[in-house]
Image (tube, coloured by chain):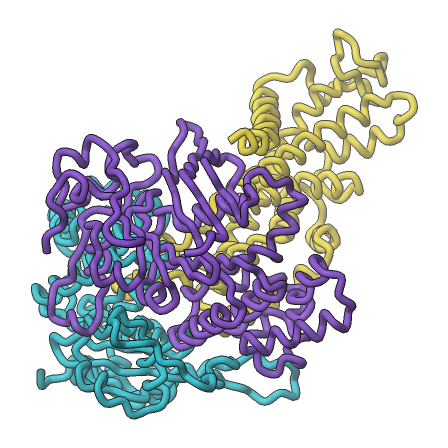
Amino acid sequence: MRTPILTVENMNVSFELVNGNYKALENITFSVYPNEVVGIVGESGCGKSLTTQAILGILPKNAIVEYEKMEYKQVSLRELRDKDWREIRGKDISMIFQEPMSALNPLITVGKQIGEVLKVHTSYSKDEIKKRTIEMMKKVGLPRAEELYKSYPHQLSGGMQQRVAIAIALIADPDLIIADEPTTALDVTIQAQILALFKKIKNEQKSSMIFISHDWGVIRNICDRVLVMYAGHIVEEGAVSEILKNPKHPYTKSLIQSIPDHRKRGMELFTIPGKVPSLQDRKIGVCPFADRCSHCFDACHIEMPMTKEIEGTHTVKCHLYTKGAGLTS
Amino acid sequence: MNLKKAKSIPFYIGVGLIVFLLLVMIISIFYTPYDPNAMDSANRLAAPSMEHLFGTDNFGRDILSRIMEGSQTAFIIGISSVTIGFIFGFLFGAIAGYFGGWFDEVISRFIDAMLAFPGILLAIMLIAVFNTGMTNTIIALGIMSIPSFARITRSSFIQYKEYDFVKASIAKGAGSFRIIFQHILPNAVSPILVAVALSFSGAVLSESGLSYLGLGVQPPDPSWGRMLKEAQAYIASAPWYVILTGLAITFLVLGFNLLADGLRDKQDRKA
Amino acid sequence: MTIPIIEVENVYKYYKQARKSFSDKNKYVKAVNGVSFSLYEGESFGLVGESGSGKSTLGQVILQLINQTSGTVKYRGKNVSTYTKKELKAWRKQVQIVFQNPYASLNPKKTIGWIMEEPLNIHRIGNKAFRRQRVMEVLEEVGLDHTFMDRYPHELSGGQRQRVAIASAIILEPEFMVIDEGVSALDVSVQAQILNLLKRLQRKYRLTYLFISHDLNVVQYFCDRIAVMYLGEIVEIGETEELGRSLKHPYTKALFSSILSLDESEELKLLDGNLPSLLEI
C-alpha cells in the first residue's frame, strides 16, 4: 500500500498510581493508510480508547507515554506544541464520541457549533460559513437544515445529535477521523443509518478512520482492517473478513464464538472463563491472555509472544504459532 | 491524592472547632473560673488580665465564665431545635416523597408557604404569639428549620424511589417500611447530615439574633446574643467584651458550616 | 405449553404530560397502547423494540410495579389487580425482575450477603442459619463463592453484580422472571456467560422468561417467541424462526434489516427514508 497517514510504533502507556506504576498499553504498533477504515475491537478495559487518546495527546496527567514513532503525515505528534495541536485537532484529525450530548455545548445552537470549526481554522466570511454549515448538515442527513440551524442540542433526538457531532467532525474536511463507539448509544435502526453515513463519508471525502467498537457486527460492516486488543496489547491484526473467517488468536476466536445469534439457538454459547484483568492485576512480560486461554502451554507463562505473520497483513501474537502447532479447531 | 487532602483541611478545622466548643461546654457544667452571675461592682469593665482572662462586663461579672456558661444555651438550643426540625421535616418529606400524589401536593404547598417567610421573621412571629423564653425559642427555631429538612428528605426519597434496587426489592415483596428504612434512608443519610450541620449553625445564629433583639432567651439563662447586645454599649470603652463574645458565636457557626461543606464535598466526590 | 402463566389483555398505560400553560389541554404519553399477549410455562418470550417503545413499562406493568391505566394482567388465570395485600405479597415470591444496569440494581450501602438474604427475610423463610446456608447455595449456583457475602456492590465487576442480581431473584425459586435488558450492559464474553447461566437456571427451575431487549441478535438466540413493540403497540408477534422469515410490518422489516450480521453473505441493507416518528421524538 501507499505511505501511511498515521504510524504508531512501539507505544507504551503507563499510569502512575499511588501504589506504583501500571502498564496500560504495551508495544502498540499500527498504521492507518489513506482512505482506510481501521477498527479497534475488544472488551471494556482493554485499552481501545486509551490508544486513540494517547495519539491525540489527551490522556490524563498521570499517564506516561513512551514511543519509538508516532507520526501523522511525517510530523511527530508528541513533539507538537499546544499551538500546533490546536491547528491539527478538528482540522486534520477530528474525533467523534459515544455520547453525542456530552460532546455538544447545550447553550449554543447546533449551527453555530458546526460553523465554529470553520471560524477557528479558516478565514471564510460569516455567510460563507453559514452556507457551508447548512451544506454539511444536509450531507449528514439532518432534515430541514435551515430550520435546525437555530435549534439547541436538547431539542434533537439522540440520532440527530450524533449527526450534529459528525457534522462538526467533518466540516473542516479532516484526513483522519477517530470515532469512539459512535453508534453504541443509539437504537439499532439509527445505528444502521449512522453506519451508512460513515460509509458515504469514506467514499466521498476519501478520509481515513479509526473506528473503536466492542461490537463485531459494527466492525464488520464499516472497517477494512481490524486490530484486536486484549489487556493493553494488540493480539491480532488483519483484514476484517479474513479475521472473522479465520481467527488465529484464541482470544479473537472465543470472542467471535461467544456472540449470540439466531443460528446458535438452543446451543450453549461459547464462553471465556474469568474476566479481563484490571490494571493492577496484569502480569508483565508474559502472554496477557494465558490465564484464561484453554490452549495455553509452558511458554505462555514465561515470555511475551512475538508478532507472527500469518498471511499478508494478518498477524498474531500467540505462542501457538511461534512455538506450538497452531490453533486446531 | 494531595488535592483530596487539601480539600479536607477545612472539614477538619470545622470538626476541631466543634469539638473544642463542645469540651468548653462540658467543662462549664462542672467548672467555671467564677460564678457567671457574681457581680463585682468594684471591678466593672476590667480589661483582660490574669485574674479575668477575658475581662469583666458592666456589672463586673467574669466574661470568660459567662461565655462558657452561654455555650450550654447555644448547644441546647441548637440540638433541640434541630431535633424538632429533623423529626417533623423528615416525616413530612418522607411521606411527600415516598407516597407522592395528594400527600405531596399538600405538604409541598405547606413547605412553600413556610419558605416564603424569612425564617427569622417567622420565629419572631411565633415568639410574639407564644412569648419569649428558652422553650419557646427552641420551638420557634425548630419550626423554622422544618422546611429545609422536609425539602431535602423529599427530594432524596423521590430520587431513590426510582432506583432499580428499590424496584427490585418491591418486586420481591418488600413493604413500605422496609423500603424506607433499609433502602432509601441509608442512601439518603449524607445529604440529610449536611442539612443537620447547616441547620445547627443556622439555629445558633438565629438564637443570637433573637436574644440580641431581646426576644430570645431571658435572664437568668445566659446567652451569647444577649451578651453581645449588652457589650454593644461599651464597644469603645471595653472592645474585648464585644469581640470575644462575637468570636464565640463566629467559631461555633463557622465550625458547623465548615463541617457541612466538608460533608458535601465528600458526598460529591463519591458521586 | 397450553396453560398460559401470564395473560396480558388490552393493557394501556398513559402518562399525563405536564401542561405548559393553563389553557393547554391535558396531553398524554401513550407508553403502552392496547397490548395483549400470553406467556406459556417454560418459554422464553422476547420483547424487542427501541428506546421509548414502551417495552420496559410493559414489563413493570406485568409485575405490578407500575399500575396500568386500563386492561388486565392475569397470573395463572387470576386477575392480579384483585389480589389482596396478602395475596400480592405471596405472588411476589413467584415473579421476579432483573434490571439492565448492574450498577443501579444493587443497594450500594448493603453487603451482597444482606442483599441475597433480603427476599428470605421479607417472606420470613427459615431461621438465620438456614438463610445463610441458602444464600451460599444460590451464590454457588450462579458461579460465585461465599467470600462474596461480606463484600459491597462497588467491589464487584459488572458481570459479578449481574450474577448477584440474578441470584437474589432466584433465591425464592420463582416461576416467572422479567429480564429487562439484563445482559445489554455487559461485554460479549460476560454476556455469553450470563446467557448460559439463565438458560441453565431455566432448565433447572422450569422458569418462564419475559426477555426485554433491544438487541435482536441476543433475542433471536435466546427466545422461543418474539414480540416487536413500536410506539407502545405490539406490531408483530411470532415464533422466532418464523418471524425472521416472513416479516409483515414495515417497522419490523426496518428493525430486522438493521441487524448487523457477521455472516459474509448478509450485507447491511440500507433503509431509504428515515423512520420519522422515532427520529422526531
Q: Where is residue A329 in the image (x, y as percent from the top left)?
A: 10, 56
The chain coloured cyan is C
Q: What is chain B's hue in the picture? A: yellow
- Work out whether residue B72 or residue C44 is closer to the camera in this orientation and state it: C44
Quarter occupied by the N terminus of chain C: bottom left
Q: What is chain A's hue in the picture? A: purple
User: Which residue lies most toward the front here?
Assistant: A2
Give me the residue at 43% from left, 37% from top: A13
Residue A6 horizontal side relative to residue C177, left or right: right
Vertical placement of residue C176 versus A75, above or below: below
Give me the residue at 51% from left, 60% from top: A96
Q: Position of residue B66 (x, y in %)?
A: 71, 23
- Work out whether residue A17 or residue A321 is closer to the camera in this orientation and state it: A321
Give me the residue at 85% from left, 17% from top: B44
Residue C169 horizontal side relative to residue B112, left or right: left
- Work out whether residue B63 or residue C152 is closer to the camera in this orientation and state it: C152
Give me the residue at 56% from left, 26% from top: B19
Q: Quadrant of residue B18?
A: top right
